[in-house]
Image: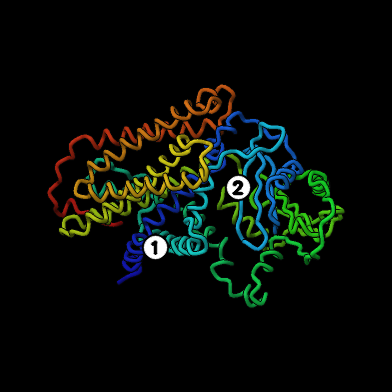
């Protein structure tokens, strides 16, 4: 067995086994490229494009009025171009429970907006499957499998440049799917290789913690604190005096950074005399902009520590910025979106090739593989659209509204999976109906948005030149039209299968 033959087996099984999981990861990451735009779309209070005039002191005052428990820390982030509102989070001392709110930018005083999962739901689904550390490890393992599949795929493709220009959608099923798999794999190969590598690399300290455990005697948080920039002061267990203005400390930080923008502001042990304020520099439009940290005494405003990002942390920020499209603006995020969709298409094509090769063997288990394909490849996008419908239909006053949105997503996906199992014997009809349902969901959302958000419908967004908000509705319309076109194609009677013979056999490469 030569190198190419051994790599062919590795590519087939190394890509097949995690393919459904990789599809979930890549699809969620693709949507998360525009997570902040999706956050705005899912919060009608933000549709007007009003930038908040509130200050950090206003946000802290709201926290003091509405949260009576003793806090371990709280943190906040000011308005940005993509998120024109204040965000606040806090941790109650001794509980390790976290709370987060976002404030309506239209009022003079902070008032929380209705809860929603927002685009952050897809970001978390992308990197840890909403399963904490266990999910993060699973995603990391899937990323390693993807690296193996990409490298082995490159080795076995002798005609990689020819495959770039080859797509025969009217050929017999296996040939057409193989062309699609090769085309989308070649088009997105550099992107997928870089994203798979950086996705694993930025969590390497979590995947391989032995060095930090040994060097810091098991205190891994001290390691992360030193690397990222953190100043720790022991609690005095004495009442805190009147705190210094956070707005004044933010202005002082901007002056020390020659006008650079401020990102996260956090206050540790706010009820103790030892309270400190960390002001972190916000990343700019370049890859890996350093996020330096200034630490002040919360009472006197004295500068206690200034930590510039180390060389190692700058390298980490560069990799993280490259992976998360934190540079280049909307054009780069659009490119990431297109390449992410190519990755999804590559996985679908690869699995269809695997199925087409085994159809003639009479393997009864293939119907279950097809049911799994329909549950994941069509079920996840449909469940995501159902989440957006839930966001619009669940009343704003509903308690635990974000949790209810999550259950809409889970329930819709389970229903899609059940549907796929029941229709596993007729996958063509199932796919046609799924496409029609996707068209109804996608095309109906802009209409529903217009009925439930006076300032957020497509015509209003386009009239004031708010392309960031309009892009969500435009993408939904495009997706719905594509679903309709594909459903129309699948409505036609399938072409008569060609008689298998030597001339019709398709080689892998």
Asked if residue 102 can be seen in this view, the reply is: yes
Residue 498 disc label: none
Number of numbered discs: 2
The answer to whether 290 appears left or right of 497 in the picture is: right
Q: Is residue 124 above or below residue 261?
A: below
SS at circle 2? loop
Label 1: state its secondary structure.
helix
The quarter of the picture where the N terminus appears is: bottom left
Task: Give the residue at x 82% y 50%.
Answer: 243
Q: Quadrant of residue 367?
A: bottom left
Q: CA distance from mark 2 to mark 1?
A: 30 Å
Mark 1 nearby-residue class (10 Å; few <14, some 14–19, many ≥20): many
Q: Which residue is mark 1?
A: 152
Closer to us: 483 or 321:
483
Q: Which residue is mark 2?
A: 326
Residue toward you, 63 or 255: 63
Give the side of residue 172 with respect to residue 7, left or right.
left
Q: Quadrant of the C terminus?
A: bottom left
- Of residues 322 and 37, the one drawn nearer to the viewer in this rendering: 37
* Percent coordinates x, y for residue 474 in the rendering: 47, 31
Mark 2 vs 1, N-terminal side: 1
Task: Using a 10 Å C-alpha cutoff, classify the residue at mark 2 as few (fewer than 14 neighbours), some (14 to 19) or many (20 or more).
Answer: many
């Amino acid at each position: 067995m030569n190198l190419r033959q051994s790599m062919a087996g590795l590519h087939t099984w190394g890509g097949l086994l995690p393919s459904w999981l990789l599809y979930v990861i890549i699809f969620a990451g693709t949507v998360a490229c525009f997570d902040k735009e999706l956050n705005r779309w899912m919060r009608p209070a933000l549709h007007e494009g009003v930038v908040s005039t509130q200050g950090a002191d206003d946000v802290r005052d709201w926290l003091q009025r509405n949260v009576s428990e003793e806090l371990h820390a709280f943190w906040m982030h000011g308005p940005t171009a993509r998120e024109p509102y204040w965000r606040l989070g806090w941790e109650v001392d001794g509980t390790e429970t976290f709370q987060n709110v976002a404030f309506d930018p239209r009022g003079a005083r902070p008032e929380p907006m209705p809860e929603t999962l927002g685009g952050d739901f897809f970001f978390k689904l992308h990197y840890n499957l909403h399963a904490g550390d266990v999910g993060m490890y699973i995603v990391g393992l899937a990323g390693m499998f993807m690296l193996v599949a990409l490298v082995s795929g490159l080795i076995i493709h002798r005609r990689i440049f020819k495959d770039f220009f080859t797509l025969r959608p009217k050929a017999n099923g296996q040939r057409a799917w193989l062309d699609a798999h090769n085309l989308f794999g070649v088009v997105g190969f550099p992107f997928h290789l870089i994203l798979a590598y950086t996705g694993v690399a930025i969590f390497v300290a979590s995947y391989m913690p032995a060095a930090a455990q040994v060097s810091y005697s098991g205190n891994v948080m001290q390691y992360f604190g030193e690397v990222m920039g953190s100043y720790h002061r022991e609690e005095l267990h004495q009442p805190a005096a009147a705190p210094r203005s956070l707005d004044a400390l933010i202005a002082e930080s901007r002056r020390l950074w020659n006008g650079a923008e401020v990102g996260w502001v956090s206050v540790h042990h706010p009820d103790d005399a030892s309270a400190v304020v960390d002001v972190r520099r916000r990343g700019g439009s370049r890859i890996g902009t350093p996020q330096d940290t200034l630490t002040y005494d919360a009472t006197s405003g004295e500068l206690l520590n200034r930590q510039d990002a180390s060389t190692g942390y700058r390298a980490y920020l560069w990799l993280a910025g490259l992976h998360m499209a934190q540079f280049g603006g909307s054009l780069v995020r659009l490119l990431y979106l297109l390449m992410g969709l190519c990755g999804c298409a590559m996985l679908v094509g690869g699995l269809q090739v695997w199925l087409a090769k085994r159809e003639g063997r009479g393997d009864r288990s293939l119907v279950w593989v097809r049911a799994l394909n329909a549950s994941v490849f069509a079920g996840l996008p449909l469940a995501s659209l159902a989440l957006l419908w839930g966001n619009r239909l669940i009343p704003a006053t509903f308690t635990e509204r974000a949790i209810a949105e999550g259950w809409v997503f889970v329930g819709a996906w389970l229903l899609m999976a059940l549907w796929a199992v029941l229709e596993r014997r007729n996958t063509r009809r199932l796919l046609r109906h799924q496409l029609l349902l996707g068209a109804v969901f996608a095309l109906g959302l802009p209409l529903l948005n217009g009925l439930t958000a006076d300032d957020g419908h497509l015509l209003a967004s386009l009239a004031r030149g708010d392309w960031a908000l309009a892009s969500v509705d435009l993408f939904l319309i495009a997706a719905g039209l594509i679903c309709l076109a594909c459903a129309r194609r699948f409505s036609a009677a399938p072409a008569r299968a060609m008689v298998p013979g030597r001339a019709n056999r398709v080689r892998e490469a």
